[in-house]
Image: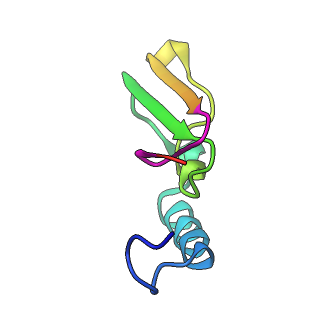
Amino acid sequence: MEFFGSNYSLTETYRLVGAVQSKYGGITAYKGDKVVFPNGSVDPWKSLGLPVGDPDKNIDAFIIKGALEMLLA
């Protein structure tokens, strides 16, 4: 399925995910609190979210089976 044109392939998406992680430090650099991270199980961007919550910071994280960003696969 193509949403954004031929410039956006799965390979390009993974490359961009890596670039974002390199620039901002990945999940270990996250300092926010009072946040919910819904992660789609088939979302190629899910590695930019937090895989588990942190009750001390009021952070919840969960996986939505079959979800791709805001779409259901």
Residue located at (62% from left, 49% from top): 42
Measured as percent of width and height from the top left, residue 53 is found at 56, 24
Measured as percent of width and height from the top left, residue 32 is found at 39, 33
Quadrant in the picture for residue 12: bottom right
Q: Does 49 sit above or below residue 13?
A: above
Name the colour scheme.
rainbow
Q: Does 43 sit above or below residue 52?
A: below
**Of residues 46 and 71, which is closer to you in this image?**
71
What's drawn in magenta, residue-wise? 64-71
Residue located at (49% from left, 22% from top): 60
Left or right relative to 33: residue 15: right
Q: Is residue 16 magenta?
A: no
Residue located at (44% from left, 16% from top): 58
Left or right relative to 52: residue 34: left
**Of residues 65 and 28, which is closer to you in this image?**
65
Furthest residue toward bottom:
6
Could you tell me how many numbered marks the image carries? Answer: 0
Residue located at (53% from left, 56% from top): 45
Measured as percent of width and height from the top left, residue 20 is found at 49, 64
Quadrant in the picture for residue 54: top right
Left or right relative to 33: residue 14: right
Q: Does 19 sit above or below residue 32?
A: below
